[in-house]
Image (cartoon, rainbow, N blue to C red):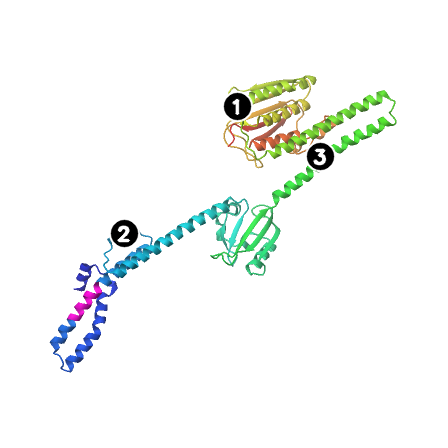
Amino acid sequence: MFKRHYAVFDIEKSNKFVDRILFLSLPSALVFIMLAVLNLISPMLAIVSYAVIIVFNTILLFPITFELQQLRRYISSLAQGEAVDEQNMKLSEKETREIVEAVNAMHRFWAQKADSLEAQSISDTAVLDTLPDPIMMIDRSGNILGANLSSRTLFGDNITDKNVEMLFDSNNFIEAVSKVLKKESEAENLIFYVKEPVNQKLYAHIKQLPWQSKGRAVAVISLYDLTKAMKIEKMQSDFVANASHELRTPLAIISGFIETLLTTAKGDEAAQEHFLKIMQDQAAYMSALIENLLSLSKIELTQDQKPDEKADIGKIIEDVRQALSLHASERNITLKTAVDEDVGIITADVHQVKQVIQNLTDNAVKYGLSNSDVTISARISEQIPGSKSVNVAEGKAVAVAINNKGPKISPENMARLTERFYRMQEHKDMNIRGTGLGLSIAKQIILRHHGNITVTSTSYGGTTFTVYFPCEQA
């Protein structure tokens, strides 16, 4: 009977509605039983009266029970994130309507809070991911709870499943983290070395989070890679030392000859002419060296600027041929060009591209055999050869090759050709002057354009330098 009524009135069986009615009517039942036992009322009247009270309680509790049941369903659905239309609810009691309105207001408030927190979290994550240095948040046990993109790139996407002790094999670093986690120190700074994933010298800053911060994170670790800075510092130190050394020799020669001209060779016209010629050569060498140093510095300043000019490779090659034709004729060398028809205009720095081709061609003429040919050719390459040390662009490129006929370059010398101030001993023995900066300048220009340079050298085919410039700058 009760199951049928549950279905008719849409009352859940689990709410124990009947049990509540019987429990509420129990005191009245006891009173009527006492009255009937004392013969104050008849048993029939007691039963009828009790039945009336049950009916009265049922009529009184049914609306409240029904609406509380709807209210419970509504709140449960909201808690589970389900879409509920409150217009379908049948509410007649003022109190339940007020409860629904309060629940809706609270739901809207926390929904707005959740949206705001989610947006803030996404924003904070995006900001942290843009930072170039690794940043990690850790809990009291040293477990990594969060990491920015730089950390995930360096240590892997599963970094948040690890403890800091698993990432670093430095005892000094682990001790510094332990001091901060144990609140023995508010912040720790140290420099340490790691071997994994690569050999690096790192600077670490470990700091407690303020007590107002929420969540399990108690400290933040920020890392800075000192390896690159050390390499740059060493390069600058070597650069200054090499430049000083290269300038010291011609200056000493000029100073010595000046002293000779002022003393022992003061009246010797033949010696004066000979010494002045040497001094002129040394001054020209110093001028070329300083010019190359300034050019190298200027190129390094523009290293991060994307080239945006339009360079006609065919025209540049022809200009270089004409500019160096006189120098080539002095050594009985013929300059030849071979430019494919499909080689057109690329996006590049016109002056720097011309500087690379002219430097390489000048070297080819300078170090090539007399009575031979130097050929400048250009073609389209489907892609730039990859390199472990150079970040090359994707897509088509123009390959410019400069070939001369000369002695084969050994693998040992070939590996050092682009080093600053490096000159092969054979060239020094042949008394061929040079600053040793031409290929270094070419390398820096090629790096800026995200291109590449390759060298091949054989006894029968001569030496070929091939530079690749992408057709478009990404």
Q: Give the image location of residue 248, x and y in percent.
A: 76, 33
> Which amino acid, by three-letter code, is at mark 3?
Ala
State the CA–CA distance, disc 1 to disc 3. 37 Å
Answer with mark 1 or mark 3, whichever residue precedes in sequence. 3
Q: Give the image location of residue 253, x and y in percent.
A: 79, 30
Above-or-below relation of 446 to 189: above
Residue tagged 2: 85
Residue 435, can we see it? Answer: no
**What secondary structure is the stretch in magenta mostly built from?**
helix
Residue 354, can we see it? Answer: yes
Residue 243 image label = 3
Above-or-below relation of 415 to 346: below
Residue tagged 1: 345
Sort mark 2 into few (<14), some (14-19) or many (20+) by Cα contacts within 10 Å.
few
Judged from the image, the secondary structure of the residue bearing numbered disc 2 is loop
> Which amino acid, by three-letter code, is at mark 2?
Asp
Locate residue 164 relative to residue 358 in the image: left or right: left
